[in-house]
Image (cartoon, rainbow, N blue to C red):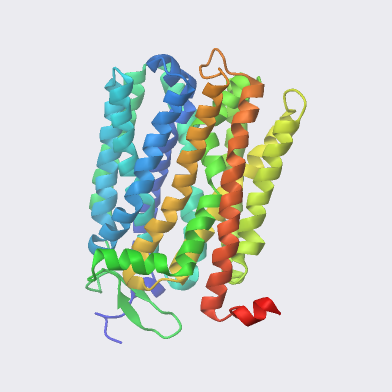
Amino acid sequence: MPDSTRSPASTPGWHGWLIWSVGVAAYVLAIANRTSLGAVGVDAAERFHADAATLSLFAVVQLAVYGGMQIPVGVFLDRYGARPIITLGMVLMAAGQLTMAISPSIGIAIVARVLLGAGDAMVFPAVLRLVATWFPAQRGPLMVQLTGVIGQSGQLVALIPVAALLHATTWTITFGSIAGLGILFAILVFAVIRNHPPEVQADVTINTDTGVVRVVTSAIDTGVGIRAAWAHPGTRLAFWSHFATPFAGTAFVLLWGMPFLTAGEGLSPAEAATLISVYVAFGMFLGPVLGELSRRNPNRRSVALVLPTVAVQLIAWVAVIVYPGPAPLWLLYLLAIALATGGPASMIAFDHARTHNPAHRLSTATGLTNAGGFIAALTAVFLIGLALDLQGAGTPDTYSLSAFRLAFLTQVPLWLLGVTFILIERKRTRIRMGLDRERTRRSRST
C-alpha cells in the first residue's frame, strides 16, 4: 500500500503521542474552566447576590450552550479537523473567563458562561478526533478512557488552586489568570497539533480487519449526515448511555456539591474538597478498567457496565437522602465513589458511536452522543436549584440539609428516563446487528 494512502494510525509513534498529549492537556484546562465556578459557588452567590435559581442559571446556560454546540462542532470537525477547532475553543474560553473576571453584574456573567460553554464544547470531541486519526481502532476504547481520565484531573485544578487563588487574591485576578492560561494554550495547540499524519492527504481512519482506509472529512450534505447518524439505533443508544451516566456527578462537581457538603452536611471546606478529590481520583482509577472491559465485551457494554453504574449512583444517593440527620463521613465517601463511576461509564457511549457509524460522520455522531450527557446535566442543575428556591432555601444563608435532600431527588426521573431508552435502543441495536431476532406480531401474540 503506498505511503500516501496508508494510515499511520496503526503505528502512531512519538509524534502521535505528542499531539494527543497536547490535546489532552487542553482538555484538562477545559475541564478546569468548566468547573471553576463550582469550586467557588458560595463566593459567586455572594459576589452577584444570587439566589439558588440564579446561581444554577450560570451552569444551565453554560451546559445548554455546550450541548447545543455539539452537533455543529461535530459537523465542523468532519469538515475542518481538530487543530482549528481546539484553538478556537481555547480562545473562546479565555474570552469567557476574562469577561467573568471583570463582570459587574449577573447579565455580563451569563455572557461569560455562554462564551465558556461554546469554547468548552469544542475541545473533547476534537481530542476524540485525534484519537481516531492518529491511533489504531483496537486502542480506541482504552484511548478514549485515558482521555477522559486525564481530563478529569482538571476538576482538581479548579477545586484546589482556583479556590486557593481566589481566597488569597481577588475575583478579577483569579479569573483573569485562567484567561491568560487559555491564550497560552491556544498558541501551544496551534503550534503542535496537526489534523492528520503527514504521510496522508486528509483525516483518515483504517479498518484494521480489512486494511481499507477511508477519508474522514465529510463531503455530504450536513443535514443528511445528522439524520443518518441519528437514524442508527447505535447512535441513539450512545446518546442515552451518555444521558444517564454522568449527569449526577457533573451537577455535583459543577455547582451543587460544595454547598451541599458544607452548608448542608456541615463539613469544613477542606473536608469537602478532600471528598470531591476522592471523587475525581476514583474516576481516574476506574476509567482504564472500564475501557478494557468495554473492549473485551463489545456486545454487553450496556447491561454489564452502563446500567450497573446508574444503579450504583441511584442507590448511593437514596442512602444519603434517607439517612436520619447528617450522613456519616464514610457514607459521603461512598456517595463520591458511586458518582465517580458515571464519568468513565459515559465514555462507553463513544465506543457505541464509533462502532455503529462510518468514518465520514464520526464526529457528527460523537457530537450527538456528547449532547446527551449535558442535556441531562443542565436539566439536573436547574431542577436542583429550582427545588431549593421553592423550599425557601435558595441563598447561602438559608441552605439546609432537608432542602438539599428533596432537591437532589429531582435526579431520579432523569435516571429512569435514561434507563428506559437505553433498554429500548439496545434491543433495536442488537436486532440491527443480527444478534437478536425482531419480534413479529405473530410472535407477540403467541
Q: Measuring 58% from the left and 79% from the top, which residue is drawn there? A: 438
Q: Residue furthest toward the top?
A: 397
- Asked if residue 169 is positioned above or below residue 89 in the image, the reply reads above
Q: Is residue 114 left or right of residue 381?
A: left
The residue nearer to you, when weighing 326 against 222, is 222
* Residue 62 image offset from top left, x and y in percent: 37, 37
In the rendered image, the quadrant that contains the N terminus is: bottom left
Residue 403 screen position, x and y as percent: 62, 23
Q: Quadrant of residue 443?
A: bottom right
Give the quarter of the image for residue 212.
bottom left
Is 203 placed left or right of 259 in the picture? left
Give x and y (percent) for residue 131.
40, 63
Quadrant of the frame with the C terminus: bottom right
Examine the rendering and report whether any part of residue 204 can be seen.
yes
**Residue 283 seen in render:** no
Q: Which residue occupies the foreground of this view, 209 or 218?
A: 218
| Whether residue 420 is situated above or below residue 187 in the rendered picture | below
Residue ID at (45%, 65%): 235
> Which residue occupies 75% across, 23% down?
325
| Residue 314 image-quadrant placement | top right
Along the line of sight, the residue nearer the viewer: 331 or 175: 331
